[in-house]
Image: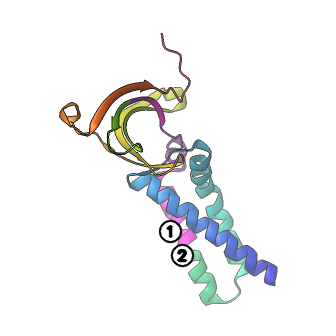
Amino acid sequence: MKIKKIISTLLNIVFVMTILFFIFDALTEFEIKNQTIKSSIYYGLLILTPIVFIWNVLTFKTKKKRIISLILPILTLIGILIIGPIKIISSSPAWRTQTVLYQNGHSNFKKVEFQMQDVGAFGYNKRTVEVTYLTDLFMFVKSVDRNIDKSVEWVRVDKDINELGLKHP
């Protein structure tokens, strides 16, 4: 009995953390930079939802605990069906830095970058954004001010990074 309780607790904690990271990445300025982590979160959401649902149905004996434990998996499943599993999978590629256009003169972790996202057969999405790195794995992204050239805090660097490894003509 004790092992079932430990597995239930761990499985539900991992499930909640997966949902939180997915929501932050999909709906806020917070983004996951690391492709392995981002894919784990997006695919994990699709895989863990039915697993947690079935586990909680089979594990919890009392009606009250079973109903409470099924609320989050059911809401998540509804969200997945509304968004669409294919759209979730196609949103899983991380944005890769191609060029650092500007560096903040006061903070090394703030940059303006040209980024690309590989969307498979559909080619590449492109964007230019202001990035604030929390770590190498996570960042905050916001749109770039149009008058950035006139701003004193930004220094033009035009540093080629090419994280996608694309060959230039």
In-image side of 88 versus 148 (left or right): right
Q: Which residues are magenta?
A: 71-100
Numbered tag placed on residue 71 in the rendering: 2
Residue 126 in the image, given as x and y percentages of width and height:
40, 31
Quadrant housing residue 69: bottom right
Closer to the camera, 52 or 164?
164
Q: How is the image coloured?
A: rainbow
Q: Amino acid at mark 2?
A: Ile
Residue 107 in the image, given as x and y percentages of width and height:
36, 45
Calculate the distance from the C-alpha at mark 2 to the C-alpha at mark 1: 6 Å
Q: Amino acid at mark 1?
A: Leu
Is 70 magenta? The answer is no
Describe the element under mark 1 as helix, strand or loop.
helix
Location of residue 70 with respect to 79 vertically, above or below? below
Describe the element under mark 2 as helix, strand or loop.
helix
Residue 63 in the image, given as x and y percentages of width and height:
63, 88
Provide the residue designation for mark 1.
75
Pointer 2 local density, CA inside 10 Å: few below 14, some 14–19, many at least 20: few
Residue 150 in the image, given as x and y percentages of width and height:
18, 33
Pointer 1 local density, CA inside 10 Å: few below 14, some 14–19, many at least 20: few
